[in-house]
């Protein structure tokens, strides 16, 4: 474990101990202040996220970590419903990738909720939007195959680059 992981583990242990203390105080009939009640509610919500992160980060029975969802780091949770499929049709659009329904969350903030992703081979795509809305997170989840059943035969390369600030608009 690195120093950062040790520090994160000790913070988590401290928060879990605080949660246990507040629950014990409430169970024994002790009066909780308004601040303690808010902290208890916040820690209980965090506990649900910890459990979800642990479930998503744990490999499934077949050893495929991204088959039912995935986590990048400990702050993101991705889930896919209905799986994904490689689209192979006789249409002029060619093959591609379609994920009929997925969700990505960072903590309690929903970045994508029941979103649909459809990419066709040979087309160019761009993601435009305000900062903090999940554009890079979505690309990282696709590159790490954290969304369900992205085909192993599909070659994915994520090149992370920062664009220099300029007066040109994003579409120029």
Image: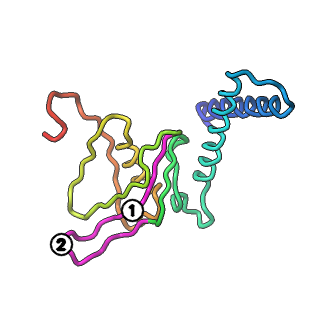
Q: Tell me where residue 92 appears, x and y as whole percent.
A: 18, 72
Q: Which residues are magenta?
A: 84-106
Given residues 63 and 142, the one toward you in this image is 142
Give the quarter of the image for residue 163.
top left
Vertical arrangement, residue 8 with respect to residue 33, above or below: below
Disc assigned to residue 99: 1
Tell whether 24 sits left or right of 126.
Answer: right
Tell whether 53 sits left or right of 28.
Answer: left
Mark 2 lies on residue: 92
Quadrant (top left, top right, bottom left, bottom right) of the C terminus: top left
Helix, strand, or loop for circle 2?
loop
Residue at 38%, 68% (x, y): give it: 153
Question: Few, some or many C-alpha atoms within 10 Å of disc 1 (few <14, some 14-19, many ≥20)?
Answer: many
Q: Is residue 105 magenta?
A: yes
Q: Tell me where residue 139 appears, x and y as whole percent.
A: 36, 49
User: CA separation, marks 1 and 2?
Assistant: 20 Å
């Amino acid at each position: 474990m690195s120093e950062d992981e040790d520090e994160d583990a000790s913070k988590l242990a401290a928060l879990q101990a605080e949660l246990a203390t507040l629950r014990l105080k409430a169970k024994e009939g002790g009066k909780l202040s308004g601040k303690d009640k808010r902290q208890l509610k916040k820690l209980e919500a965090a506990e649900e996220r910890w459990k979800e992160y642990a479930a998503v980060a744990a490999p499934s029975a077949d050893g495929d970590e991204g088959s039912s969802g995935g986590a990048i780091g400990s702050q993101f949770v991705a889930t896919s419903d209905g799986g994904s499929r490689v689209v192979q049709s006789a249409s002029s659009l060619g093959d591609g990738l379609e994920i009929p329904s997925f969700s990505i969350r960072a903590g309690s903030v929903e970045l994508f909720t029941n979103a649909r992703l459809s990419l066709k081979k040979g087309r160019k795509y761009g993601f435009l939007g305000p900062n903090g809305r999940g554009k890079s997170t979505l690309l990282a989840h696709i590159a790490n195959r954290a969304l369900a059943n992205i085909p192993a035969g599909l070659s994915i390369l994520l090149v992370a680059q920062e664009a220099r600030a300029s007066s040109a608009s994003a579409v120029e």
